[in-house]
Image (cartoon, rainbow, N blue to C red):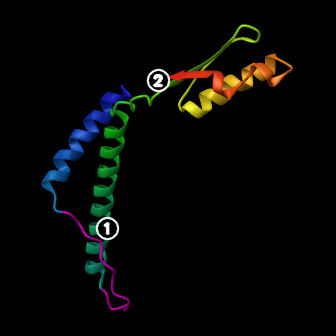
Amino acid sequence: MKKLLCTILLFSSFSLFASQDIFRIEIGKRDSSSDTQDLRQRVWMLEQAVRQLQDKVFQLEYSNANRPSPVASKQYTCTLQNNMAGTFTSTKGSMGEAKADVIKQCTDKNSSNFFCKKKDVECSE
């Protein structure tokens, strides 16, 4: 229901936006001699400019909501296999993170770093 309402508002704002002139907000006069008609016209123009900005915001929000999520970045899987220490595997967004996690898993399980060497870690995408 909410999506339907947003879609209706979006399409109605497209048609309104396409048919209207763009209102540019200009700085008003500083003197107090402006008459009521000038002030009313200025308020009307400001209201129209605000409406156009709202329409644009709704349009951008709707287009962002329907945009597919970004494709997942590369994933690196690193493995440390040692007959004495065991096998440790980690998958992370960067090779460095995956290697560090594998070494940490190995050192957490083994009291000695002897079996947890960086040179023994193998990684792939």
Dot 2 amino acid type: Glu
Disc 1: which residue: 46
Going 32% across and 35% down the picture, which residue do you hit?
6
In the image, taking residue 87 as reference, residue 11 lies left or right, namely left
Residue 87, percent from left and from top? 67, 11
Going 29% across and 85% down the picture, which residue do you hit?
35
Q: Residue 67: which quarter of the image?
A: top left
Residue 116, percent from left and from top? 74, 22
Q: Residue 32: which quarter of the image?
A: bottom left
Asked if the residue under mark 1 is in contact with the one under mark 2, i.e. CB atoms within 8 Å, the reply is no
The residue range painted magenta reads 22-34
Tell me the number on the disc at residue 125: 2
Q: Using the image, determine if residue 2 lies above or below residue 78.
A: below
Q: Dot 2: what SS? A: loop
Indicate the quadrant containing the N terminus: top left, top right, bottom left or bottom right.
Answer: top left
Q: Using the image, determine if residue 30 lies above or below residue 75.
A: below
The prevailing secondary structure element of the residues shown in magenta is loop
